[in-house]
Amino acid sequence: MTTALTQPAARRAPRRRPRPGQPIAAVLTAAAVLGVPFWLVVATAGKDQGEALDPNLSAPTEWRLWENFATVFADGRMPSAFFGSLLVMVPAVVGVLVLGSMAAWILGRRGGRLSAAIYALGISGIVLPPAVVTIVLLLRQLGLAGTALGMIGVYMGMYLSTVIFFVTGFVRTIPHELEEAARVDGAGPVRVFVRIILPLLRPVLATATILICLYIWNDVFYALFVIGGRIDTLPLNLYQVASAGLYLQNWHLIFAYIILMSLPLLITFMVAQRRIISGITSGAVK
């Protein structure tokens, strides 16, 4: 009897002892992958023109980071480009969040094949690239080519599918009883959405906001074809001044411009890091 009881225990595979070196190796690998490019940018931005001709990982002989920042800020037209980026980004982000969250609320609450087909069509923009030539021709027909309004419309059309994808999964986790109680109290659809649904969507909307802001803030391709230099944005301005020769072979100024351009989103990401992670796990995964 005792032998029969001990046989299954003997057949069990021994537990593998955790290897303490694995987490350390993973952390060191991540630090190298992220830290080396970051150090290359900072070190090059801190050098003078002679040292920065051949960008490498060596530290500057004398740090000139703040002097390069001042040169870029004064000669690179950064203030006007900064406000140009805000002029395009803020209305586009607000509009796509409002329209996308409202559409996701309806799609998340309604079932059936028609709603499933509309949802598939709504998120198809994530994988289907927009036709740039068609967009430019359409904007010319509408008289919006080269305008901020046309650029805002392009960004809203491009990233509406991202908001629908994130928010629809989150809406499905919200209990129906909350909306039913509000309707019993006499609230209409708009009031239910604004008072009940929208406050609950803050984590996932924070995630979508950061992602869309990142896409728009760093975009130069669509801005080049749509507004064509008539409105300065930070990436488009960097492309123009580098092409014009101001930053030609001046890698220290280019990298200094990149650092200044990335600071607003970097600070925003650090402040809203917890909301972003909670929005990803609760919205996209569910």
Image (spheres, helix red, strand yellow):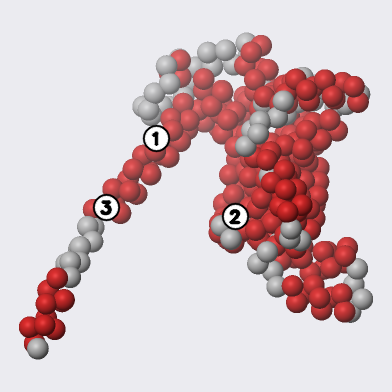
Q: Which mark is residue 244?
A: none
Quarter of the image that includes the C terminus:
bottom right
Residue sitting nearer the eye, 249 or 200: 200
**Residue neighbourhood size for the residue with mark 3, other residues' Cα within 10 Å, grouped as few (<14), some (14–19), many (≥20):** few
**Residue neighbourhood size for the residue with mark 1, other residues' Cα within 10 Å, grouped as few (<14), some (14–19), many (≥20):** few
Q: How many marks?
A: 3
Q: Is residue 111 above or below residue 56?
A: below
Q: Is residue 137 left or right of residue 286?
A: right
Q: Amino acid at mark 3?
A: Gln
Whole-percent x, y for residue 27 in the image: 34, 49
Element marked by disc 3: helix
Q: Amino acid at mark 1?
A: Val
Is residue 85 shown to the viewer in this render?
A: yes
Choose top left, top right, bottom left or bottom right for residue 283: bottom right
Q: Is residue 99 left or right of residue 1?
A: right
Whole-percent x, y for residue 212 in the image: 67, 43
Q: Is residue 45 above or below residue 217?
A: above
Distance, label 2 to label 1, CA atoms, is: 31 Å
Question: In the rendered structure, which disc, 2 or 1, sits on the residue that comes first in sequence?
Answer: 1
Q: Nearer the viewer, mark 2 or mark 1?
A: 2
Which residue, given by chain and number where applicable, does mark 1 sit on?
A: 36
Distance, label 3 to label 2, CA atoms, is: 29 Å
Q: Is residue 242 above or below residue 105?
A: above
Residue drawn at 64 percent across, 40 percent down: 126
Distance, label 3 to label 1, CA atoms, is: 21 Å
Q: Is residue 223 left or right of residue 53?
A: right
Which residue, given by chain and number where applicable, does mark 2 sit on?
A: 284
Question: In the rendered structure, which disc, 3 or 1, sits on the residue that comes first in sequence?
Answer: 3
Q: Nearer the viewer, mark 3 or mark 2?
A: 2
Which residue, given by chain and number where applicable, does mark 3 sit on?
A: 22
Choose top left, top right, bottom left or bottom right for residue 106: bottom right
